[in-house]
Amino acid sequence: MAEPVRVGRLTDQEGQRLQQIVRRGSTSSVRYRRAMMLLASAGGNRVPVVAQLVAADEDTVRDLIHRFNEIGLACLDPKWAGGRPRLLSADDEDFVVATATTRPVRLGQPFTRWSIRKLAAYLRKVHGRVIRIGREALRCLLSRRGVTFQRTKTWKESTDPQRDAKLGRIEHVLEHLPDRTFAFDEFGPLGIRPTAGSFWAPQNRPQRIPATYHRTHGVTYFHGCYSIGDDTLWGVNRRHKGAAQSLAALKSIRAARPDGAPIYVIMDKLSAHKGAKIRAWAKKHRVELCFTPTNASWANPIEAHFGPLRQFTLANSHHPNHTVQTRALHTYLRWRNANTRHSQPSDENAPESAARKACAGEDAPSLRRDRSGRSASSRSAGSRLGDAAPVRLDQVPAVSVQVPEDGDRAIGLTPGSLFESDTGRAHALVVAVERVSV
């Protein structure tokens, strides 16, 4: 008569490990049941009792005991093998992946994308080969091969035949002539509405801004100018975006370098930037217009500075009108230009570029003389834009002013100031001040 099947004598480590698995029950169900079989057999229970304890077949218990006597506790970990033969070869899987990543229209199907159900049905009746695969097996196969369901994205590629030449010219002036190089662009339209953004707040307690349904304020466009050498950004809000507004911005850039030497302005190919009038003015005043290639406005250096301007003045905002919105933009520009990374402490007597002065936005008085010849203070351009009745900058001519070097500094002529008439209406916008010896 054959001896009963039972596990050999357990070592202390084996007994403690089996007891730990059975007590905790935190492992997989397979390891738990197998540990219970071995521990019960080691306790003197015969195979039928152990099989009834774990609700298993007696042959399963015997196989596990023999396996334990051969390799020890390694028998607790299942070694899955066997099962149904594979129905898909490696070539079939490659074909499934290639089909899933191909647009259905190209394969003669009347839809623009695959679903799991449609793809499985197509694979069953594709001409030349039949692939039978269930929807869940198909999903697992695609996931295993790194094919996921994603949103389609658009892209643009420049079709400009002079793309390389234009990019090369822009790179040249940025690298070799940064002090003479500027960038210009617009962004907008800027409406008066609550704009979503981000803010630090207690968890699950976000700040709220109201919704609007009636927007009657119209829109404006920010016309921005950026000095590469000075790392200075300035600009104005205008009601319209056209050739007249672009020319006014170019004049303010030219006034930032009033020495008459050539300057270079990087801008995109918007029709309002390249009209005959603008080209004639640029040629006369030695301004080279460096246009970015078609669909390549990313080459304009000012684009990177528009991002922070939007995030810190427009995002998470609720401006009541364009006056307040413009004031916020100019307040940020003054802070930004005063806190640039490479900015140095200002010296009152040190020479300073007109561009940095123009966008410093300090509330310096501008010149206005009454009939008796006395000077009176008016508001600067930065504060003027924030008044209840803002002056239309596109209707105010831009001028450069020469004053005596030893003149009275209390007059307060600074770039961004306004000449005003006796009636208090703007007469001209000062974009540059040059002191000359007399």
Image (tube, grey):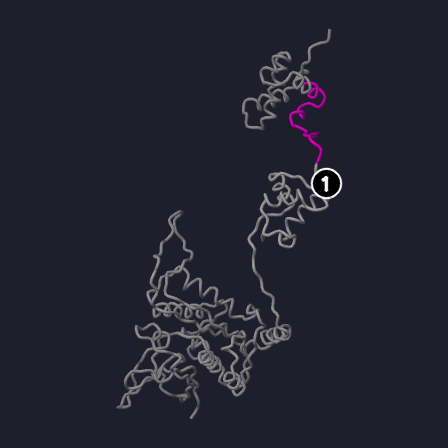
Q: Is residue 92 above or below residue 401?
A: above
For this orientation, the residue located farthest to the left is: 372
Residue at the image point whose x is 73% and y is 44% from the top: 91
For this orientation, the residue located farthest to the top is: 1
Residue at the image point whose x is 55% and y is 69% from the top: 297
Q: Is residue 206 above or below residue 226?
A: above
Which of the 4 image quarters holds residue 47? top right
The percent position of residue 120, horizontal first and vertical second, equals: 62, 43
Q: Report the number of discs.
A: 1
Q: Which residues are magenta?
A: 65-86
Which of the 4 image quarters holds residue 170? bottom right
Residue at the image point whose x is 34% and y is 74% from the top: 383
Horizontally, residue 288 falls left or right of residue 416, namely right
> The residue under label 1 is which amino acid type?
Ser
Circle 1 residue: 89
Horizontally, residue 399 falls left or right of residue 214, namely right
Residue 114 within the segment the image draws in magenta: no
**Quarter of the rendering occupied by the N terminus:** top right
The percent position of residue 350, horizontal first and vertical second, equals: 45, 79
- Give the secondary structure at mark 1: loop
**Quarter of the rendering occupied by the C terminus:** bottom left
Horizontally, residue 109 falls left or right of residue 399, namely right
